[in-house]
Amino acid sequence: MLRLAHKHDRAIRYLHWVNVPLLAVMIWSGLLIYWAYDPYQIAVGNFVLVKFFPDWFYQALDLEHGLSTGMAFHFAFMWLFALNGLAFVAYTVWSGHWRELWPNRRTPIEALHVVLHDLKIRKQPLPLGKFNAAQKLAYCGVLLMGAGSVVTGLAIYKPTQLAGLTFLLGGYEATRLEHFALTVGYVLFVLVHVSQVIKAGWNNFRGMVTGYELVPTSNEVTTDVRPEPVAAS
């Protein structure tokens, strides 16, 4: 027998899903801006291993000649992105959910065990819990990345007014590179996150959509069951 058990609060779900279109617009508009000056590449000597990005990439996604559009969307949506992040952190702290996410001194080694388990190298079952150690590091890391994007973005946006901040970040060119590297990090995070969601299956996805997941009646979960309607969205 299975029963519905509460997993995610409504606020957590809403703020999570709002972040999806916000991040998509930020990356799209950022690429429109990057098109105008795209110097970054990974090279060994004169041999280029990776170029961010080749001309066909811009042409395929229709990202050429959109600098002003990109700046308009980027500078408008960055405030929504920042406010949504602040709301998420504030609710996590206020509700006490930070305790479920906050790493401890054993988290790094436990995260390694999770990776080895996913790679079928380590056979021992993972400890039960709402979030495993790898998820804790990933989710806390992406929150720090969000803060880094806001800080570096403001330093690029107002390099004269925020000259002290830009200086602390290594100067304008270094700050722009840091901002770009964080964007690459978001893309990698999303790819891994989506692949893990697919691997976990529909029941896990249901938890982030409705707030509830199905669990065996004999397996009492430790999460608090809230009096929230099953059809909540």
Image (cartoon, rainbow, N blue to C red):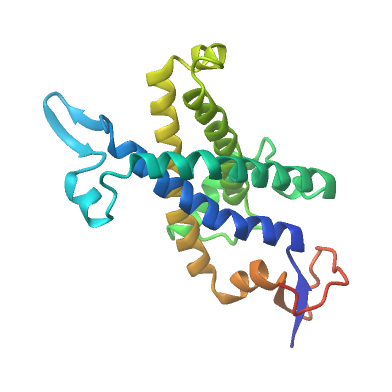
* Residue sitting at x 63%, y 54%: 132
State which quarter of the image contains the N terminus: bottom right
Residue 101, x across and y down, in percent: 70, 47
Would you identify the image quadrant in which residue 172 lies? top left
Would you identify the image quadrant in which residue 124 lies? bottom right
Which residue extends farthest right?
227
Please give left or right for residue 174 compared with residue 163 in the image.
left
Give above or below for 124 relative to 162: below
Please give left or right for residue 112 compared with residue 32 in the image.
right
* Residue sitting at x 47%, y 25%: 156
Which residue extends farthest bottom?
1
Q: Nearer the viewer, residue 78 or 212?
A: 78
Residue 113, x across and y down, in percent: 54, 50
* Residue sitting at x 71%, y 57%: 12
Give above or below for 193 relative to 148: below
Say if residue 198 shows up in the picture: yes
Residue 8, x across and y down, in percent: 73, 63
Say if residue 128 shows up in the picture: no
